[in-house]
Amino acid sequence: VPVVNSCRVTLMSRLAPTLVLLSAFAAPASGDTFTVRLDSGNAVRVNARLAGSGQDAHALELADGQLQVIPADRLIERTIGPDPTPITFDAMLQQLTDEFGVGRMVTDVEKPFVIALIRASNGPADPRFGAVVKKAGTFFKGMQNSFLEFVRQARVETVPVKYPLVAIIFESDKQFDAYAVAITGQQGLSPENIAAFYDLMSNRLVIRLRECNTFDTPLHEAVHQQVYNRGILQRLAPVPAWFNEGIATGFEGDGERIRGGPKVVSDRYGPMALRARVVDWREVVANDRCFQGDVLAAEAYGHA
């Protein structure tokens, strides 16, 4: 089974009704103030922007760019205010440190990207890790330039990035798999068949360290992050998978620079579409199911 890309499109209807409040909720910030009833029956005030409503739920956008979905019947009151002030790069680094531990992280900032390599142990750090995060920051910055040039030529309107764009690199596959299971709830592809992914809810790229040689799959996922943070698509909107994945599969690189964009047939995915024997184009357009299975996903991405 080939290792393929995975952009997790989580529909509100799939989310568990239990409300999980992140520490950022309690931090002082501007924005609408939402009074929300917890599972315990207690109420808490949340500062956020209402990103959207539907399927009996509300999506709240926090100051760090994360989305938190709450059931509509948990919202007690909403007081209108200005949008939250986006988190700073220093505050984002501190948030990651609180989550993973200062002894486990090697970091770099290449604005608007924050790169965090999470080590497998607290022992002495491999001196090569510093070069890895520098390389990642440089690559993603170059990818962003190529992406913006493509959308400029395509006459697609964009908006500036509001939040630091986080990329988390896990040193060990065991770390990556555990994090992927926790984030995705084991929906979609199996963790061992995912090389990297962009998570719509946390707004993070998540990458295996071994993928930082060619950045083949991280490039694909970084395009997803650009699309959703530049106002081209809206997170949690019902965008067809073939369209969403088709944009990202159009970009290809060699580990140092971007070699191609969606204006030309992909050297990687074009042959995949020609060799496809199980999934056809009509099925890809009709539904998203083939993008979520380990066996069918490679052919689906080829068609996209």
Image (cartoon, grey):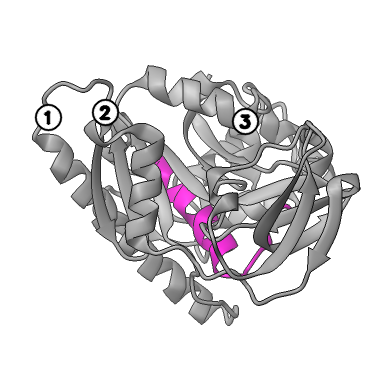
Compared to residue 133, the image places residue 297 above or below, namely above
Location of mark 2 (residue): 119
Q: Closest to the observer: 15 or 190?
A: 15
Q: Main secondary structure of the magenta part?
A: helix
Residue 238 in sight: no
Location of mark 1 (residue): 126
Span highlighted in magenta in the image: 216-237
Report the residue at 37% width, 65% height from top: 112
Query: In 3D space, how far apart are the residues under numbered discs 2 and 3 (Cα atoms)?
Result: 22 Å
In percent of width and height, residue 204 lies at 49, 47
Location of mark 3 (residue): 184
Compared to residue 239, the image places residue 214 above or below, namely above
**Is the Cβ of the residue at disc 1 closer than 8 Å to that at disc 2?**
yes
Looking at the image, tell me whether mark 2 or mark 3 is earlier in sequence order.
2
| SS of the residue under disc 1 | loop
Task: Name the image quarter holding residue 275.
Answer: top right
Residue density around tag 1, few if under 14, some if 14–19, many if 20 or more, within 10 Å: few
Report the residue at 56% width, 65% height from top: 29
In the image, what residue type sits under mark 3?
Thr
Q: Closest to the observer: 155 or 103?
A: 103
Q: Furthest residue to the front?
A: 42
Query: In 3D space, how far apart are the residues under numbered discs 3 and 1 (Cα atoms)?
Result: 30 Å
In percent of width and height, residue 221 lies at 49, 47
Looking at the image, tell me whether mark 3 or mark 1 is earlier in sequence order.
1
| SS of the residue under disc 2 | loop
138 sits left or right of 175 in the view? left
Q: Closest to the observer: 35 or 54?
A: 35
